[in-house]
Amino acid sequence: MTWEGWVTITIVLLMAVALLRSIAGPDVVLMGGLTLLMTLQLFSDKFLSPAQAAAGFGNEGLLTIGVLFVIAEGLSLTGAMDVLAQPLLGRPKTALTAQIRMMAPTAVLSAFLNNTTIVAMFIPAINDWCKKIGVSPSKLFMPLSFAAIMGGCCTLIGTTTNLIVHGMVLSDQAKGELAGIDIGMFTISAVGLPVAFAGMLYILLTSPVLLPNRGKRTISLAEARRYTVEMLVETGSAVDGQSIEQAGLRHLPGAYLVEIDRGGDRLIAVGPEQILRGGDQLIFVGVVDSVRDLQKIRGLVPATDQVFKLKDPRPGRCLVEAVVSNSCPLLGKTIREGRFRTVYNAAVIAVYRSGEHLNQKIGDIVLRPGDTLLIETHPRFIETQRNRQDFFLVSQVEGSQPRRHDRAWIALLLLAGIVALSATDTMRLLNAALLAAGMMVITRCCSAHEARASIEWRVLVIIGAALGIGRALETTGAAQGIATQLIGLFQGLGPIGVLLGVYLVTMLFNTLIGAAGAAAMVFPIAKATAAALGVSFMPFVIALMIGASSSYASLFYQTNLMVYGPGGYRFTDYLRFGLPLNLLVMAVVMAVVPKVWPLVAVIPN
């Protein structure tokens, strides 16, 4: 191996140490390593040129992930993901049942759709689901990513890696090589299904111990700022005619239903079997996050009609908390008498007063100094009132934009269009995703500002830098040198030993540089090794597909990166939980592949 290769390996090892010790975030560590490898071109042309380093950020897969964030935002803001996810996810009572309900549909969908698309779709839905069922996000997001990976291993189109390996096989067959190698849609299923079953069983058994519990601390109603808020059941809506239990209003995180006002009749201490009717006014007591979540439920709207009289379109509004000051001109007046909406172009939807339960309609509450108002208004309200004396404190509630339920069907149609165009090879996934993202903005499923804000730039930086580092391992000869040496260690163990060596090398490079790079670098080595042993190449192809896709201990795999932030994970979490799963999958592959595709001798032509 050249000195350039040894230097590259040293830099990669130093980055691994920095990640293991959490010296800095993955984006900082990888960008630092990429910069160093590019700077070293001053001493040798084998290191990265600026063009090669930048090429990773123009990678089609990276751009596709960025666009999928926009599509996921449109699905979230319209409530379309709730329509898809709620029937599948339900309301489990434990983290174990939540994992079962989540992983099964994720694996099935991922077998026929790109796993990156599946994870991007489910992230916002799982995030809201965690709050509703009281389960830490760290218990669900890594299983979500792993289930998507395992499902993708069950068909040829399930992962990009499978398609890359298949493409290399077809390319060699066009040259007259690899005769007899035939890979169909479900060829890999013979090993993919056992891998998925064993992998999900491992997750269910070990996640209580190996997965961290880093959920946000839940604030009890006794110690939190409690708002009283009224919501109206829209006639003919999704919740009209449902029971409280069916509508998902029984076990709300940080909130409870106090009573129902039905045409002047007050229903107190209602049970979960109580049927909701159009026009019912539901009185809740809850923390600000729960009030925000109530706004997102299809079929519920604020009971005050003032929100529908505001000048700005409702999808462009947000929730704001404002504390009434001693100099507010509306002191001593009811919200209705003071014409709060007219004065501030804002509608009060809830009021908090030192823990006191305000058993009045919103418009009849007399304002006092220190009252905290939860207001629906336009974002400009914050800048307008921040330097005035009417309120002591003004702050926006994060993620409080009202759902655009009337556009949910548009978002679902756009999603179906992506699936149809990419699955039928009519259009590449990036092209289809860009069209759908543009239509999300044009049809107002999300605004251009929301589309820009939805992109997780940190994730894209990590992926782009990782691709550049993978390129450096290849150009300096480090990858080829390591792979050749490691596989040579297993040649004395016979064909099955060499197959194990190929799998281990693939798994190693998968952890370091990602699935696509690992598949591309190990394929020619595996082919040459099979030819030297005089055995069938088919077992090596299948092992390469599974090994390159099994990215459970790697932070740098696309879906693992996507759940890194939402799950609150650290680099070491992937090693602790993913490495045993990698070894389990390897054991299944070594047990199944030689039996289904024997390592028989091949007679040369």
Image (tube, rainbow, N blue to C red):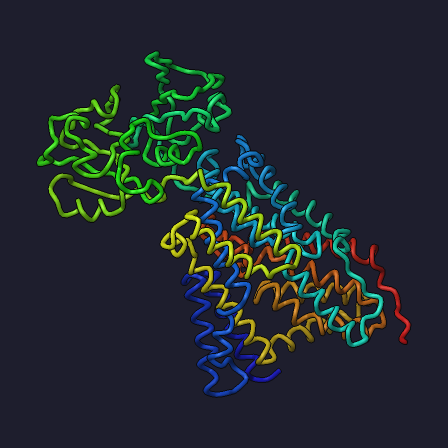
Q: Is residue 197 visible?
A: yes
Instruction: Indicate the position of residue 62 as horizontal and vertical percent values.
Output: 51, 63
Instruction: Indicate the position of residue 574 as horizontal and vertical percent values.
Output: 54, 54
Instruction: Indicate the position of residue 338 as horizontal and vertical percent values.
Output: 14, 29
Q: Residue furthest top?
A: 265
Q: Is 465 rendered above or below residue 71?
A: below
In the image, what residue occupies the spot 49% across and 81% down? 49
Q: Is 141 rendered above or below residue 499?
A: above
The total of numbered circles placed on residues is 0
Q: Is 477 rendered above or below residue 308?
A: below
In front: 390, or 509? 390
Quarter-of-image position of residue 494:
bottom right
In the image, what residue occupies the spot 35% across and 33% down? 291
Q: Is 137 rendered above or below residue 188?
A: above
Seen in the image, is 104 located left or right of residue 310?
A: right
Instruction: Indicate the position of residue 208 as horizontal and vertical percent values.
Output: 55, 40
Image quarter of the C terminus: bottom right
